[in-house]
Amino acid sequence: MTISFRQLEIFEKVARTGHVTRAGEELLLTQSAISMAVSQLESLTGAPLFERSGRRLILNDRGRLLLAEAGGILQAVRRLEQRLQKNGGELTGELLVGGSTTVGNYLLPALLGAFARMYPKTRVQLRVGNTRQVVAWVEEGKLDIAFIEGPCHSRGVVAVPWRDDELVVVAGPDHAWGMEGGATAEMLASAPWVMRERGSGTREVFEAAMDALGVSYSIALELGHTEAIKNGVASGLGVSCLSRLAVHRELEHGWLVAIDSPLALTRSLALIRRRASFRTPLVSAFLDVAQGAWDVAGCDGLAT
């Protein structure tokens, strides 16, 4: 008996989710079918691949080794399926989509939902990271297409404008800036800023805007997640600069306050793909949905 593609697919899903039940829900299989596939794979490899902790399955060193190899195999087969997909047939296959934090959390879920409704036999996996991470994943072939909010500095990736976005300086509802109606360059320089880590597109746009204004600034606290930044600012830890997409609800409810400033904070969100990559029917369909959702200009620049 040899290891099958389906066994590797199930193993990967269990490894990513850590739960038989959750893996079964995502693959539309019963718990018993998932458990049987894992048991068969462990029998074929000659040793356990997971440590059991209650209902949670945690990869051991053998499991991590297999996952690293299985990921490449599964990705290669899925890409082959996409390349062989005929334009005239019903669209199937799996698309690997990435998004930098703001885009991935606040725009892509709706876009992926629209795509799934239009093409129910396809699957889309979404991976979210900061802009630098997402660009690296595209370069490494771990993503088919991605959406970023920061500048792309890679020569191996082609980027085209997707839609505009605006950053906004925000403070807590009791912050003095809210009472004064805005912040001058001198006030921006003396503020304790709560910002994303380096590699974040939002951080890079903020730093470029501050440099263009000739303002020195101090980052008091770096946090890796936008939600943590919003909560910290609302609690009075400092001020921040975030996408209006990310703080729309907080501004609407008065949990945060938008601060007028002399900073130029408009940016362009971009679609990126590997340079000279093959544009499959699945990728083309996804680009069409993205273009239809927000009237993307220049999407054809991603074709090869």
Image (cartoon, rainbow, N blue to C red):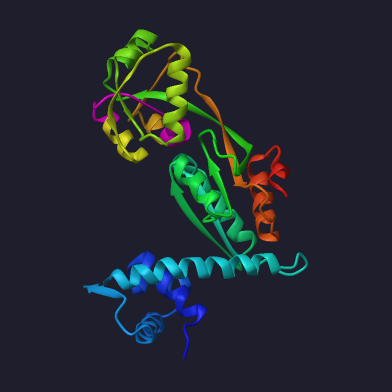
Q: Quadrant of residue 229?
A: top left
Q: Residue at x 60, y 35 (%)?
A: 163
Q: Residue at x 61, y 65 (%)?
A: 79
In the image shown, does 43 or 17 lie closer to the viewer?
43
Work out which residue is located at the far left of the displayed protein and give it. Answer: 54
In this orientation, does residue 87 appear? yes
Give how far across and how far down residue 5 sits, in percent: 51, 78
Q: Quadrant of residue 219?
A: top left
Q: Quadrant of residue 284?
A: bottom right
Q: Residue at x 70, y 69 (%)?
A: 84
Please check the rendered image and state whether residue 134 is part of the magenta-colored stretch, yes or no: no
Work out which residue is located at the far right of the displayed protein and give it. Answer: 88
Q: Is residue 10 left or right of residue 159?
A: left
Please check the rendered image and state whether residue 247 is part of the magenta-colored stretch, yes or no: yes
Give how far across and how far down residue 216 sits, in percent: 36, 14
Q: Is residue 239 above or below residue 276?
A: above
In the image shown, does 1 or 287 lie closer to the viewer?
1
Q: How many marks?
A: 0
Q: Is residue 121 above or below residue 259?
A: below
In the image shown, does 32 or 256 lie closer to the viewer?
32
Give how far across and how far down residue 203 sits, in percent: 41, 30
In this orientation, does residue 184 appear? no
Give how far across and how far down residue 142 sits, in percent: 51, 56
Region of the chain picked out in magenta, as a range? 233-248
Q: Is residue 175 above or below residue 83?
A: above
Q: Is residue 54 left or right of residue 38?
A: left
